[in-house]
């Protein structure tokens, strides 16, 4: 009996020791960083334990819930949303939120993740329902901002702070996608046609401008060429008249010049009619006098009042050059007329002035 009692007492002591050790182990709680423990005492909220070493009252205190204090990322399945133009689009969203009050997250809502998901779906439908498809596709930042503001305000009493809301994808129906692709293709074709037309227009403008400049330069070149020819002819006429008057040429020399010019006139086949000048008979008389058939032919004498001509170039200004050439030709004609009048011939009223 004594041995039996000792064995029973020893077992009881061992069981009691084990019970005490287990109770003490459960009473000591180590909370990890970024976590919070909700402690209840006899079924009521007692306190929130943050990171560190904590002690619980055995059989009185109990850890009700463990809350993760880090920022959480949840990607919700695509939600079908109807736009204002009665088109159904699938929107895939991602929410970044963080628990700021562990007690409120546990006691204010049964499941805060499900609550955030449902609130996101309803809010997203309300926001997108006021927009058409084009606004929905181009206003992601606006939708994100409105959605975040509404969610942050609604989840504040749950001890949750919504940091960011992102729309990952907005998928319109396939028929709408095809229409959008056709529209984009038509828009690109329109822009290409506009660019091509602009290029053709610029090319035509540049070509016309080049032709204009070419025509202007050609006209200026022709004008300069005509002025140069006129000036050269005027200088040649002046030099001929000066040589004639300075050399005291008589009627024999002039008659000889007439005879030399007659073959030049008859060279071309188109010269069917000859125009004989009015003083040609006088020239023939001079020729006959030169061969001894008629006397009285006197050499031509220059007018004592005639001044030597100053032949200058006026190529700087085409108009002045042309005017100067005309003036020199008129002066030479006047001198020739005067010289022919004083040559000793009888005045012929039918003869044209300036002819020798």
Image (cartoon, rainbow, N blue to C red):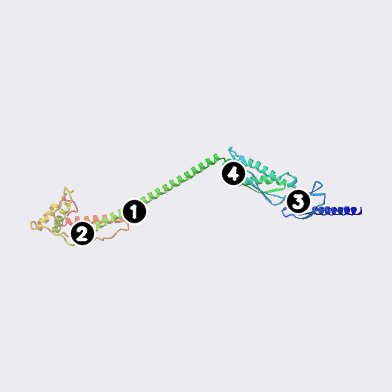
Q: Which residue is mark 3?
A: 37
Select label 1 or label 4 by which is in front: 4
Residue at the far top: name it: 86
Q: Which residue is mark 2?
A: 240
Q: Residues within 10 Å of mark 1 (few under 14, many from 20)?
A: few
Element at badge 1? helix
Where 197 sits versus 298, above or below? above
Which residue occupies 22% across, 60% down? 239
Q: Position of residue 213 (x, y in %)?
A: 36, 52
Q: Position of residue 25 (x, y in %)?
A: 80, 54
Is residue 80 shown left or right of residue 24? left
N-term-proximal mark, 2 vs 1: 1
Quarter of the image where the C terminus is located: bottom left
Is residue 189 shown left or right of residue 333? right
Select label 2 or label 1 by which is in front: 1
- How far apart are the alpha carbons under marks 4 and 3? 39 Å
Q: Residues within 10 Å of mark 2 (few under 14, many from 20)?
A: few
- How far apart are the alpha carbons under marks 2 and 4? 98 Å
Q: Which residue is mark 1?
A: 217
N-term-proximal mark, 1 vs 3: 3
Q: Position of residue 204 (x, y in %)?
A: 39, 48
N-term-proximal mark, 1 vs 4: 4
Which residue occupies 66% across, 46% down? 149
Q: Which residue is mark 4?
A: 170
- How far apart are the alpha carbons under marks 2 and 1? 34 Å
Q: Nearer the viewer, residue 95 or 273?
A: 95
- Residue 88 location, quadrant: top right
């Amino acid at each position: 009996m004594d041995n039996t009692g000792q064995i029973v007492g020893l077992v009881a002591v061992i069981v009691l020791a084990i019970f005490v050790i287990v109770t003490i182990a459960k009473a000591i709680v180590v909370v990890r960083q970024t976590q919070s423990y909700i402690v209840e005492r006899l079924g009521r909220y007692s306190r929130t334990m943050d990171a560190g070493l904590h002690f619980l009252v055995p059989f009185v205190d109990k850890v009700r819930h463990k809350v993760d204090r880090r920022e959480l990322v949840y990607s919700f399945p695509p939600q079908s949303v109807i736009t204002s133009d009665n088109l159904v689009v699938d929107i895939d969203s991602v929410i970044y939120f963080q628990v700021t009050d562990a007690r409120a997250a546990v006691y204010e809502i049964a499941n805060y993740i499900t609550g955030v998901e449902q609130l996101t779906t309803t809010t997203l439908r309300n926001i997108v329902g006021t927009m058409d498809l084009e606004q929905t596709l181009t206003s992601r930042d606006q939708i994100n901002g409105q959605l975040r503001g509404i969610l942050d305000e609604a989840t504040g009493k749950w001890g949750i702070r919504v940091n960011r809301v992102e729309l990952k994808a907005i998928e319109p129906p396939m028929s709408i996608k095809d229409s959008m692709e056709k529209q984009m293709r038509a828009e690109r074709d329109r822009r290409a046609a506009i660019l091509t037309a602009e290029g053709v227009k610029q090319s035509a403008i540049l070509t016309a401008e080049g032709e204009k400049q070419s025509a202007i330069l050609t006209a200026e070149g022709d004008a300069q060429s005509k002025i140069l020819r006129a000036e050269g002819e005027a200088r040649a006429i002046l030099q001929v008249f000066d040589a004639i008057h300075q050399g005291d040429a008589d009627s024999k020399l002039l008659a000889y010049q007439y005879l030399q010019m007659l073959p030049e006139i008859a060279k071309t086949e188109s010269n069917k009619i000859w125009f004989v000048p009015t003083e040609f008979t006088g020239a023939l008389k001079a020729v006959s006098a030169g061969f001894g058939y008629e006397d009285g032919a006197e050499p031509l004498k220059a007018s004592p009042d005639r001044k030597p001509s100053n032949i200058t170039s006026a190529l700087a200004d085409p108009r002045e050059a042309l005017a100067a050439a005309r003036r020199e030709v008129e002066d030479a004609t006047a001198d020739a007329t005067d010289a022919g009048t004083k040559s000793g011939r009888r005045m012929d009223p039918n003869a044209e002035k300036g002819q020798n």
